[in-house]
Image (tube, rainbow, N blue to C red):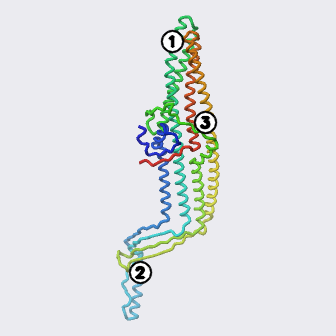
Amino acid sequence: MFYAIVTTVTLALPPQQPGPLDSIARVAIVRNLGIRRATLAQREAEAGVTQARGLFMPTLGVDARYSELSGGVNIGDLINPAYATLNQLTGHNAFPTNIDATLPLGQETRLRATLPLFNGALFANLSGARAIHTLRGAERAAAVRRLDADVRIAYLDLARATSAVAILDETAPVIAENLRTAQRLVDAGTATPDAVLRSRAAQAEVRQQHADAVRLQGAALGALNLLLDQAPDAPVPALGDDNLPPVPALSLADALAASGRREEREMARAAVDGARARGSAAASAFLPSVALAADYGVQGNRYQFDKDHDVAIASVVLSWNLFNGGQDAGRRESASASLQAADLQAAEIDRRIALDVRTSWDAVQVAREVTAAAAARLDAARSAYSLVDRRFAEGLAAHLEWADARAQFTAARLNLVMTRFQLAARGVELERAAALRALTREEPR
């Protein structure tokens, strides 16, 4: 069920052939709710950039008003008597005496277009929106990288616990037979009762280890399914020892150089850009803003669409805040402090990434040594058990010696399984810390 939706994710890997770990990582990137939230946050920031760009474009809108007046001022009441007097003095009816113009006018409808000619705040706003968009994109990319590592480590934890359960299941019948043999030897008088007690203790230890391994297996399955956004007990394809990913082999200097691709650095740069945009916005308050406005419409006490009632107005609007009690200076000082804080945060992030890389690289080197020692331990324990088992079959070795050799062999097998999976997990952590995997995420279709 995991392989039906992996086509929506592009996962650029090192030259080796992609394996089950990479497939399940793709599934997690598509399904994980945290990645979905980060994707939506990036879309929101992208819409903010579009909105900021739109502030530079002309705007066009319609304003309309129609009013029924009662008790308003009629200009005709003031002008008509004066015009009547003039007509009497001149002896001609040259001036109208029936003017009816009530203020405000009954209707006013206009089409308004505005265009900003200069406004420093708009440029600062666009820079800030772009910084936020870059920040959200880097946050999503960082979340993808973190999830890619977490889900692969969770898969390795599950496989490690499953292998331990399988080894203990295989060992249980041998331990039970060991107990029966010890009991027969005691009954035959060829062994002391402590052999039975030792066998029972060994059997109890195996049961305890098995129960703990089963618990860890269930916990690992639940943690993995949580990352995959599915039921806690949903089955997952088994991961065999032969599918363990290769551990990166590179020097510490190369790992530190590769970590320059870490998304946290881009997040820090975006924070610095955002602080600079905030400073630009504060500085723009000291400059004037200029805009062009054009109105065209009709006005009067009723709607009349002709040239006698058309109104057209073109305006250049200048706005300049000369004094506001030091608010602009305070905002500029605040933005300057924010920029310094962002620079310090970027330096701190660089140090944290370097420490993360060094710690992960050192862990891989130690895990290599531990795995090599565990392999040598298993070879020695296997050889010792083979010799003791042959001698025991020939009656030349005591049952206690055989049981001890068998216990050492089982412990060595478990130890090698643990160390091999631990080495693989340390390699995954190094890949994350040094950004060795180029991860890209496409939008779900």
Identify the residue at the far top of this view.
189
Label for residue 180?
A: 1
Tell whether 26 sits left or right of 271: left
| Residue that carries the numbered disc 3 in the rendered image | 364
Q: Residue at x 48, y 34 (%)?
A: 222
Label 3 SS: helix
Label 1 or label 2, whichever lies nearer to me, is 1
User: Mark 3, residues whose alpha carbon is within 10 Å: few (<14), some, or many (≥20)?
Assistant: many
Tell whether 217 sits left or right of 282: left
Mark 2 and mark 3 lie on one chain; the one further toward the N terminus is 2
> Gap in Å between the C-alphas at discs 3 and 1?
44 Å
Label for residue 75?
A: 2
Q: Amino acid at mark 2?
A: Ile
Label 3 or label 1, whichever lies nearer to me, is 3
User: Mark 1, residues whose alpha carbon is within 10 Å: few (<14), some, or many (≥20)?
Assistant: some
Q: Amino acid at mark 1?
A: Arg
Residue 399 or residue 126, whichever sits in front: 399
Quadrant holding the N terminus = top left
Label for residue 388?
A: none
Q: Position of residue 270 (x, y in %)?
A: 57, 54
Q: Position of residue 258 (x, y in %)?
A: 60, 46
Q: Position of residue 83 (x, y in %)?
A: 40, 88
Work out whether 11 lies above or below 278: above
Q: Residue at x 51, y 17 (%)?
A: 174
Q: Residue at x 49, y 36 (%)?
A: 224
Work out whether 333 lies above or below 211: below
